[in-house]
Image (cartoon, rainbow, N blue to C red):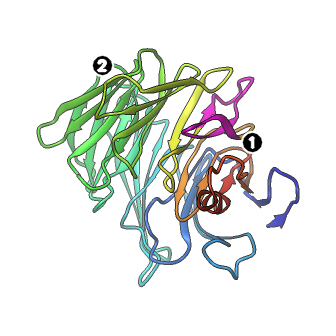
Amino acid sequence: MQADTSRVPTYTVSCEDYVHVVEFSPFSSGTPSSLLAYGGNQYVVVATCLFQEEDLEVEGVEFNVLRAFHHELRVDALAWSPESRLDRLPFIRFCTAAADRKLRLLTSDLRDKHEVKVMEGHTSYINHLVFEPTEGKQIASVSDDHTCRVWDLDGNENITLRLRSPGISVCWHPEEAFKLMVAEKKGTVRFYDLLAQQAILSLDCGQSPLMSADWCLSNTIKVGAVAGSNWLIWDITRSSYPQEKRPAHIDKARLFKWSRANENLFATTGCPGKICSQLLIHHLGHPQVSETVYAARSVFWLMTSHATVLTAGDHRLCYRGIRPQLAPDPPALRAWRRQETLLLDD
């Protein structure tokens, strides 16, 4: 790992192969370090990341690879289980999706015990998946086959929700295990009661295609999405139509992700390979874009006292800081200065 005084990047970590997907675990690992996984053509690497903001003895960022796992196909999506921990006896569990329309649930002690369970049922490309966040005993996935499916850890498909267009994003309520949010490509976001297996609320983009949606887990009345070239924000207690809608990208927008440290901070990306496929970081209440990073493909925020964004591409991990210009007052300014960005740079 080496330092760089230029704006992009501040630190880099080399990877042996192309990186398609990268995800921080949104759950505590039981240690100061955060769990991280990134996937390529036929592998998944599990690592830890520790920032100077979390340990003053760390110079910038400390990155350690724990283990690499063989994966039969290219990794297209990945989700962490809340059961994954590094204290006491290490235990790792995550689930992947690949182009063969299968989910793979990997469980490991990071030593000599590994188990891979293959889950079959989807009949088209799997776009997104997520673990139930309280106990991690269920997994939800959405697909181009117009379904959202809920699985148990034995690979059984317990619930199938029929959608009206391809499922794009799925989010689980952070505390209520029977509430699920599903976003569809045609521009609809629905909330489901899994006990009744029925929709209880729906939101309308007013345009399509909807490419990504996210539930603000620090304030669950907020939902964000990107459709066309715009980002959209809903307050679900007020209306089924967005309260805010603004253009974000010259070309089509691809992803929307809320910060896990600040309910007013979110990121959007353009479509990879397009003219303006950059990562934009936005702050509600401030009309200007707070940060622009080019060649971003995927986004994830780390939930700590600072915010961390992940994007996927090429053969390296890159780390950089976010500028504090938009902080409106001294306490917010100090908080903003604690926010850092980790990028997988194209």
What residue is drawn where x is 83% and y is 51%? 7
In this picture, residue 130 sits left or right of residue 246: left
Image quadrant occupied by the N terminus: bottom right
> What residue is shown with label 1?
346
In this picture, residue 1 sits left or right of residue 244: right
Residue placed most toward the observer, 215 or 255? 215
Image quadrant occupied by the C terminus: top right
**Outermost residue, top direction?**
207
Q: Is residue 320 above or below residue 287?
A: below
Q: Residue 91's image quarter?
A: bottom left
Q: Position of residue 305 (x, y in %)?
A: 54, 65
Specify the segment rendered in magenta: 268-290
Are discs 1 and 2 less than 8 Å apart at CB?
no
What residue is drawn where x is 88% and y is 59%? 5
Residue 262 belongs to magenta span? no
> What residue is shown with label 2?
164
Q: Position of residue 104 (x, y in %)?
A: 41, 50
Residue placed most toward the observer, 171 or 92? 171
Q: Position of residue 96 (x, y in %)?
A: 45, 49
What residue is drawn where x is 68% and y is 60%? 337
